[in-house]
Amino acid sequence: LEFDFGGSVPGLGLRFGEYGGNLNLRINGEFKNFLDFVDLNGATIGGVSVWVVSAAGNVRNGVAFFGTIDDFAIGGQELWIDDICQLRVPPPLK
C-alpha cells in the first residue's frame, strides 16, 4: 500500500500482525525488505526513526515512525495493518 498524505506528516503510527513471509517498507524513498518488524526497532529509514512494540502471539503489535514523512509505502506476505494515524511528535528533551 502506498499512501498520499497530501503533504508531509511529522510521524505515523499503526498496528500490525505479521504471520509469515517477507515484509517491505519504503519511507522517503528508502526501501527495506525484512522478515520481522522487531528487526527494525531503533533503526532510521529515510531519516525517520522506527520504534516497534511487539507482544507475544502477535497481539497488540504496533510501530511508530518519528520524523518528517513525505513518502510512505508498506506491504508484505501475510501482513495485516490497522489504525494508521498521524502522530504528533513531541519536542526533543533538553
Image (tube, rainbow, N blue to C red):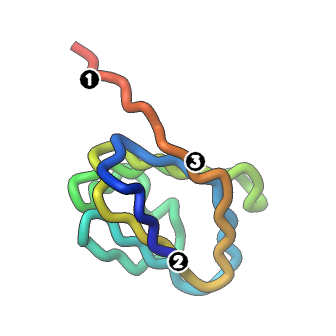
Q: Residues within 10 Å of mark 2 (few under 14, many from 20)?
A: some
Q: Residues within 10 Å of mark 1 (few under 14, many from 20)?
A: few
- Report the number of discs: 3
Mark 2 vs mark 3, foreground winner is 2
Q: Earlier in the sequence, mark 1 or mark 2?
A: 2
Front in this rendered view, residue 9 or 80: 9
Which residue matches tag 2?
75
Taking 88 as reference, is 29 left or right? left
Which label was assigned to residue 53?
A: 3
Q: Is residue 41 above or below residue 86?
A: below
Secondary structure found at label 2: strand
Q: Residue at x 32, y 64 (%)?
A: 71
Q: Residues within 10 Å of mark 3 (few under 14, many from 20)?
A: some
Secondary structure found at label 1: loop
Residue 54 visible in the shown view: no
Residue type for callout 2? Gly
Q: What is the x, y in percent for residue 41? A: 43, 54
Q: Is residue 77 above or below residue 72?
A: below
Q: Earlier in the sequence, mark 2 or mark 3?
A: 3
Q: What is the x, y in percent for residue 94? A: 21, 13
Which residue matches tag 1?
92
Residue 72 location, quadrant: bottom left
Taking 39 as reference, is 92 left or right? left
Q: What is the x, y in percent for residue 20? A: 66, 82
Residue 84 visible in the shown view: yes
